[in-house]
Image (cartoon, rainbow, N blue to C red):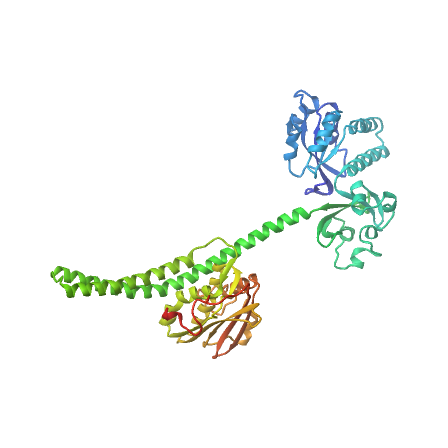
Amino acid sequence: MLSGTNPHHPERLLLRLAIVGGGRACKFFLELIKSGSFPLLEIELVGVCDINPQAEGLLMARQMGIFTTDDFRDFFKIKELDTIIELTNNRDVLLELIQLRPKRVGVVEHNIGKLLRTLFAINQRLKEAEHQVLLEKMSSDFLIQQSNAAIAVLNIDFTIAEANEAYLEMVGKAKKDVVGSYCYETYYGLSAPCSIARPTLKCPMVETLKTGKSAHVIHELSGSQENFSYGNIVTYPLKDQNDEIIRIIEIWRDVTEEISTRWAARLDEIKANCNRMVQEDRMISLGKLVASCVHEINNPIQGLLTFSHLMQAMVADNQIDPQSIGKFKEYLSIMSTELERCGNIVSGLLSFSRETPRGFADINMNDVIGAVVSLTRHKMELQNIRLTVDLSREILLLRGDTNRLQQCILNLIFNAIEAMPQGGELQVKSRLDENKKRFKVEIHDTGCGIPEENMDHLFDPFFTTKPDGEGTGLGLSIVYGVIKNHGGKIKVHSSPEQGTTFTLTFPAKYQGKAGGCFPAGSDPLTH
């Protein structure tokens, strides 16, 4: 497999090789590389293996700073290795190499030694330019044919001059049917170059002909609709002595796995960032809840202190008579009730702040609404907002994430509260559709409403009309994402100075009676 281009010589193909067998043939190949006998190739020898530590090729490689080893399996750890050349003339070694090699790595058997010696003899005997060109062509053609990448040599009229076995296998045709045919016809079945027949299909060869430089694109390769694959197509210009392009080398490499891995990593990163933003928004909401709950907890604490002082005074005055004991019981009952209320408030805050493992489970939407209403009711009292809760008497069951749905309802209620700074009315309703396949949750406020020009941007991330420092613009975009992730829909109806209604629709898994958090028409403030 050809790895790419040398960044310092983009017109030369980069080939990373390793050699098993560090004898004379290996030494000769090293000398060929040092002499620069491959003008169209940038050969990088990444390793030499021989069990004889005194093998002359192994010693020369060590002197050149090339990695050496006595176990060819070490080569499999080298990234972007293209081909291993086997020079031991040992069939068992060759078979073991072929069996153990990674799929991306090609193996060239020992007969290359004979070819290398032939090339060396030609190089030594014939110094004329004509024979030098022959040497270069033999070397380049051999290495191209041995590459695992699909390679074709194209004429500037888009006809195929040469193709290696990998290319023929890719197009599923014999060499006689490929050589001389048009590249766009051979693979895509088109009657004109890709850039003409399919303007959206970028052609790297056209780009190379225009610029005289290497070009590359990623195309979707032919295959079934279920199994998409992608190929990285790179083109390199071959020029004559006048710097005119005479041919194009085109290399195809399947990058489906690489793209899939990168997409998966990027998707994981995006999911992590989204979850982090949701949790940060949750902490902002928690801060708002804590501010109002502090006031709510302070009142019973003051009452507890008052009763404690009364009881201490009675004990200090030795007034422990039957009448005092009766008062003690009364005070203790009140104190117990108030302490339980404080405990419920703190438990609700802790439950909301805790980041539980993400996952869908069967949940009752009425329970989600009830938990949020319990946490926000005191904040509404402080702002003189009258709350009306009318929840379905039937269980509104769905597969969902409790934390995410709580965040969704909380954001909508907070928005409604902020829209009524001078007080007003907030209505929360839930209803099962007649077909019992979906249910709706409505949150209506009598606040300032939403201007018409902002309606189209309502769910855009970071869109906010609040002053700097008072909002992130993520609240409603998170609501939208949560609802979509649960297979639901959200609609908004708003009139300036008349209020806003958010209607959430979710798929119901199944329903049952008497599962609501509060009976229809009741107010959770009384529970």
Q: Is residue 177 visible?
A: yes
Q: Nearer the viewer, residue 218 or 244?
A: 218
Q: In the rendered image of this protein, does residue 371 appear above or below residue 74?
A: below
| Total tally of numbered discs in the picture | 0
Residue 272 position in % (x across, y down):
53, 53
Q: In the rendered image of this protein, does residue 69 appear above or below residue 514?
A: above
Which residue sits at x=68%, y=42%?
A: 8
Which residue sits at x=36%, y=64%?
A: 291
Q: Nearer the viewer, residue 136 or 262?
A: 262
Q: Is residue 502 left or right of residue 234?
A: left
Q: Nearer the viewer, residue 369 or 5?
A: 369
Residue 81 position in % (x across, y down):
68, 37
Q: Residue furthest front?
A: 513
Q: In the rendered image of this protein, does residue 290 appear above or below residue 422?
A: above
Q: Residue furthest left?
A: 318
Q: Is residue 31 left or right of residue 518?
A: right
Residue 501 position in % (x across, y down):
50, 74
Q: Is residue 214 visible?
A: no
Residue 51 position in % (x across, y down):
67, 22
Q: Indicate the quadrant containing the N terminus: top left, top right, bottom left or bottom right.
A: top right
Q: Indicate the quadrant containing the C terminus: top left, top right, bottom left or bottom right.
A: bottom left
Which residue sits at x=83%, y=30%?
A: 127
